[in-house]
Image (spheres, helix red, strand yellow):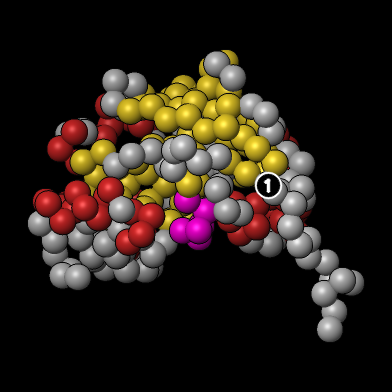
Amino acid sequence: MSRIVGDRVKRIVGERVMDFGKKIVAVGKNYESHAKEMQKLEPARAAPPPALPVIFLKPTSSYVREPGAIQVPSTVKDLHHEVELGVVIGKEGRDISVLTAMDHVAGYVLALDMTARDIQSVAKAAGLPWTIAKGYDTFTPISKFIPASKIPDWKTLELWCKVDGELRQKGYTKDMIYSVPQLISYISSIMTLEVGDMISTGTPAGVGPVAPGQVITAGITDVIEMSFPVEHRPVGHTWSPEQDTP
């Protein structure tokens, strides 16, 4: 595929982001309100706002779209919802300038960064990566693709998330600590952003638990809405070092 793609190809890439995307680059603590609530949840690890964006990777196998479901493994005891704006890359680039960053955007998706908070807390305490807490299958539900032309200004969006009809999160993209162009520029200074990659730009305050049997509904006001049931993951082989020693 050409490194520079036209609008029609960008739309195709966006609509098939689950097929084309090679990576999900997620951003932590990109809303001050969420950073503060995490300090309350984890006071022992309270710290000043990061001097640079906090980024981590999620596997594309964690994607799920409607009418799929969020599946909770038996090892996860405290699953949290985090509603986010996802930015879909439509033009490959490395060391991208903030001034030209938006030229690389094909469009957007609404995303949920589902997080096993119990597993994440243990990992943080040990200084370990968050991969397991964030990377299970179905832990990145996304909406249908929204072409960039439908959102002329990413700073004007209202994000919301409900659980069983109860409003849990409502925030505004204008309150991001690091803007979409800044994130594209920073991430591309570390790794090449490829066509179909998705940047999950962080969550506003209000994250909280969800359990099997509940339904998460999320939206970008006046733009898009999505809904996912939460289910137990079907029982399969459960790995353990004792059982799987050859």
Q: Is residue 62 magenta?
A: yes
Q: Is residue 96 above or below residue 106?
A: below
* Front residue (pair 103, 35): 103
Residue under numbered circle 1: 233
* Front residue (pair 144, 90): 144
Q: Residue at x 59, y 19 (%)?
A: 164
Res 159 visible: no
Q: Is residue 85 magenta?
A: no
- In the rendering, at what x and y percent does residue 84 appear? 44, 37
Q: Residue furthest bottom?
A: 246
Q: Residue furthest right?
A: 242
Q: Residue at x 69, y 32 (%)?
A: 211
- In the rendering, at what x and y percent does residue 234 appear? 70, 49
Residue 219 appears in which quarter of the rendering? top left
Q: Give neighbour class at mark 1: few <14, some 14-19, many 20+ (Cα, 10 Å).
A: some
Q: Residue at x 24, y 44 (%)?
A: 107
* Front residue (pair 236, 242): 236
Q: Secondary structure at mark 1?
A: loop
Which image quarter holds the C terminus?
A: bottom right
- In the rendering, at what x and y percent does residue 233 appear? 68, 47
Horizontal side, residue 25 vs residue 246: left or right? left
Q: Residue furthest top?
A: 166
**Three-letter amino acid code at the position of disc 1:** Arg
Horizontal side, residue 42 vs residue 20: left or right? right
Which image quarter holds the N terminus?
A: bottom left
Q: Is residue 221 above or below residue 233?
A: above
What segment carries the magenta color?
58-63
